[in-house]
Image (tube, rainbow, N blue to C red):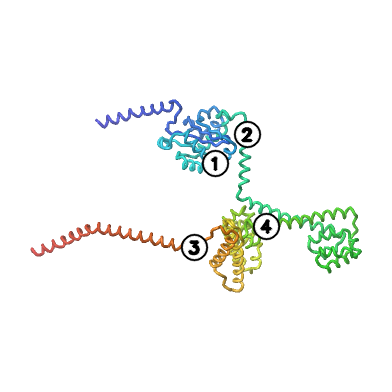
Amino acid sequence: SGRAAGSSNKKTEQPRRKSLGGQRRSGPGGRAARGMALYLLHEAASGYGLFEVVEKEELAGLEEGAQASITDLNRFSKIVKLKAFQPFTTAENALDNIMKVSENLVHDDLVAFVKANLPKAKSMAKEGAALGVSVAPFASAIKEATGVPCQSNDTVNELLRGVRLHLHRLVKNLDGGASEKAQLGLGHSYSRAKVKFNVNRQDNMIIQAICLLDQLDKDVNTCAMRVKEWYSWHFPELQKIVADSFMFARLVQLIGARTSLANDDKLDKITEVTMDEAVSKQIIEAGRTSMGMDISEIDMLNLSEFADRVVALARYRRDLHAYLLEKMSVVAPNLGALIGEAVAARLISHAGSLVNLAKCPASTIQILGAEKALFRALKTRGNTPKYGLIFHSSFIGRAGAKNKGRISRYLSNKCAIAARIDFFSETPNSIFGEKLKEQVEERLNFYETGSTPKKNLDVMREAAKEAAALVKATDPDMEVDSDDDKKKKKSKKEKKEKKDKKRKRDSDEEADEEVAVEATPVKEKKAKKSKKSTEKPKKKKQKE
């Protein structure tokens, strides 16, 4: 009867709890039935905003009618209320804060704002409250800095989307276009700062230079062919005598109409261009007996102007190549010394930056530039390419047909090492690149003759010694560890490790002894029991 009474009491208690829950839902402030408080942090261009989610019942139907709840201000203002807003003091302060936010770091202003306007972290953790943040890494950074429990999920992102949409209505001082002006100003300053402090700004110069150089090669060749074709109607024999396009354009610029070759007045000037007196005499003789058509002064004027442009373009291409060599000697001297500046610049351009190239493994560098051939081979299940952009280096062309794949693998390995040395070295020099080039030469010789190359360890030690000597010569104040210092440090480490091992061994032995001491009485008891069990049958036998 007691059990029945207890069960009847439980049944009567259940509706009471439900009614209490109903009162809690309809209570003041619209607190959630779940008992969890949710706050939202919004990083605006004008300052930090903290919002409190008031009506959690609306969150249950947020997934179904999310768009209508967020876009409608009346409905959204019932769900979210402004708790606190801290504007940035100056434009510099705004940029500093937003730069930290973009890198998922927490500014001191944000820490002070969160601690001042939120309950204590322990009480929030007990109540199950949380701070909603748009990005998960930034949420973890805030949690580490302040101890406040944070969360980032789809519901939080939807609510923050509504906050961004209605921010100028929720915060009073941001109406009248103030929010848009702050966004525009901060956007300009942020972009300016990102470009100014770009790590890859030197790489960008190389990438632009090599792209322009490739474009100029195509343009100069096209324009020079056009000059040859145009001038050959007037002087067709010159094309057979002079094969170089740049020299041909300079001769067109100098000779003009072939009637000017009637005398030997231009022999010295033509010799300055051709660098060969016999060729110059041959040009003058061919001009006197040419089979070409006559050309008017206006046509010759246009042709000579076009030749001037081609010559100027070729000279600019030469100057740009010199600029590229100078840049490569600063940014990637070892990679340039290994495979040549032009090929090294193309590798950097294709990877995007020296950082990306340094991250690439040797297998990726080997086929960099041959992605189409690789995916075509994977699709058709054919042979994959052996090399990409590194084919333009002289090593692969010098290798035999059987050894091209082997030398390309070896060369890509050395390119990966050179790129990493260039990226991480503080004082740029080409010592390691020259040593790596010697190794590739020795490997080529090994494939041809079978002579054993030097060990990689010995070569790297030599290069490290030379690099240390060069650094000391250029900057005597810089501290460089010599081999003796490294050996001393190594011996100290080994001694320390031996001492630690000895201590561990002694502690293990002591622990084993203690275990053995504890185990001896148990063993003695077992031995006594076994003795008693053996003695009993003996006594029985004696009685019998």
Q: Are marks 4 and 1 in contact (CB under 8 Å)?
A: no
Q: Secondary structure at mark 2?
A: helix
Q: Position of residue 205 (x, y in %)?
A: 66, 52
Q: Which mark is residue 181?
A: 2
Q: Are marks 2 and 3 in contact (CB under 8 Å)?
A: no
Can you identify the residue that label 4 sits on? 326
Q: Position of residue 404 (x, y in %)?
A: 62, 66
Q: Are marks 4 and 2 in contact (CB under 8 Å)?
A: no
Q: Position of residue 225 (x, y in %)?
A: 79, 58
Tell me which residue sits at (63%, 55%) in the image. Answer: 348
Task: Give the mark nearest the N terminus, 4 or 1.
Answer: 1
Query: Marks 2 and 3, Cα distance to the nearest angstrom?
Result: 60 Å
Pick whichever, 126 or 64, lies toward us.
Answer: 126
Pick whichever, 146 or 294, lies toward us.
Answer: 146
Q: Nearer the viewer, mark 3 or mark 1?
A: 3
Q: Count neighbours of disc 3 (C-alpha within 10 A) and say few if under 14, some if 14 to 19, many if 20 or more.
A: few
Task: Give the mark nearest the N terminus, 3 or 4.
Answer: 4
Q: Are marks 1 and 2 in contact (CB under 8 Å)?
A: no
* Residue type at tag 3: Asp
Q: Count neighbours of disc 2 (C-alpha within 10 A) and say few if under 14, some if 14 to 19, many if 20 or more.
A: some
Task: Find residue 504 and report its image quarter.
Answer: bottom left
Q: Is residue 380 visible?
A: no
Q: Is residue 167 above or below residue 222?
A: above
Query: Marks 3 and 1, Cα distance to the nearest angstrom?
Result: 43 Å
Query: Marks 3 and 4, Cα distance to the nearest angstrom?
Result: 36 Å
Can you identify the residue that label 3 sits on? 485
Tell me which residue sits at (61%, 47%) in the image. Answer: 197
Q: Which mark is residue 101?
A: 1
Q: Is residue 319 above or below residue 93?
A: below
Task: Give the mark nearest the N terminus, 2 or 3.
Answer: 2
Query: Marks 1 and 2, Cα distance to the nearest angstrom?
Result: 20 Å
